[in-house]
Amino acid sequence: MIFGLISGILGLLISLLIIAFFILGERKILGYCQYRKGPNKVGFMGLLQSFSDLMKLIFKFKFYSFQSRSYISLIGVFLLICLVVFYCLIYGSYYSFSYSEFNFLWFLVVTSFSSYSLLCAGWGSYSKYSFLGAMRSAFGSVSFEACFMCVVIFCSLCYGGYCISDYYFSNIYSFVLFPLIYVVFLVCILCETNRTPFDYAESESELVSGFNTEYSGIFFTCLFACEYIIIFIFSWLGSVIMFGGGLVGSIFLFVHLLFFMWARATLPRIRYDYFVNFFWSVALPLLIVSFFFIVN
């Protein structure tokens, strides 16, 4: 229990540190893709820009004298923080002696609560833009959970269990067996993390800012940081279940992070009906058909 708590805290701190430089790297890559310099003023080559933005958002305060906000919206923020802490506990337990035999299933359990946190954060803000973004995000989460459940079953059939620590020595077994499922999994995590081209919950060109329109200061920081931590956790999860641990898994962890940056810089937003049809008419049947090949 003590090892699990310590590993979870260390996992959270490591995730926050990686996310700070991931945000900086993303802004740099987006800048060069748009023929800009990106952050380069704060610190050496802009290395302290993320920490400067964090301090600005923490000390920024807003009075709500004329604007009312439901407590449900704050519950949604705190619920999302709790879900991220649970993700970090599972991530930390992978590198300690406190792992569970069913820690892969815990990912599925924690993921199923993410849509509730975004619904509370959007619906409780008393804003039509936030409400529309929350509804889009909730339906996207349902679509992701259906496909993610199939990926969990697929990995359990391949490796004979739900313990992620047993996948360490699998190397690239899953990727060689079904590379198309790996591609579907990458598309799924783009949907879960509200990233381009599936950022329907935060599409600035259509919804001003999505479910986080009415948030600022520390609450916006929490929503923003939690989203990036989930990106890191699922990038790590994809590298473990498809490429195992060790050097190959670490390399593909950074490949996944670069994939998120590349997708945001290059891919256009897909129409919402195309997105729904892809998940329920293409991705889900493809994952179900792959089960028959494994069983037979």
Image (cartoon, rainbow, N blue to C red):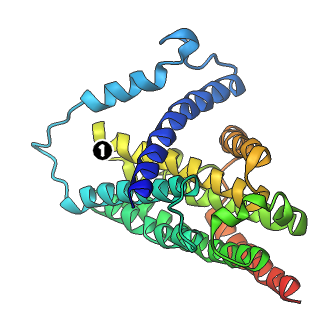
**Compared with residue 157, is residue 52 higher up or lower down, i.e. above or below?**
above
**Compared with residue 22, is residue 134 higher up or lower down, i.e. above or below?**
below
SS for dot 1: helix
Tell me the residue that label 1 is attached to: 219
Residue at image coords 29%, 39%: 218
Whether residue 112 is visible, yes or no, is yes
Rendering coords of residue 100 (x, y %): 53, 69
119 or 126, nearer to the observer? 119
Residue at image coords 57%, 60%: 192
284 displayed left or right of 127 = right
What is the crowding at mark 1: few (fewer than 14 residues within 10 Å), some, or many (at least 20)?
Answer: some
The kind of residue on which mark 1 rests is Phe
267 or 224, nearer to the observer? 224
214 displayed left or right of 150 = left
Rendering coords of residue 26 (x, y %): 61, 32
Whether residue 209 is visible, yes or no, is no
Rendering coords of residue 35 (x, y %): 70, 20
235 or 219, nearer to the observer? 235
Number of labels in the image equals 1
Which quarter of the picture shows residue 188? bottom right
217 displayed left or right of 161 = left
Rendering coords of residue 146 (x, y %): 61, 77
Which quarter of the picture shows residue 295? bottom right
Residue at image coords 69%, 79%: 153
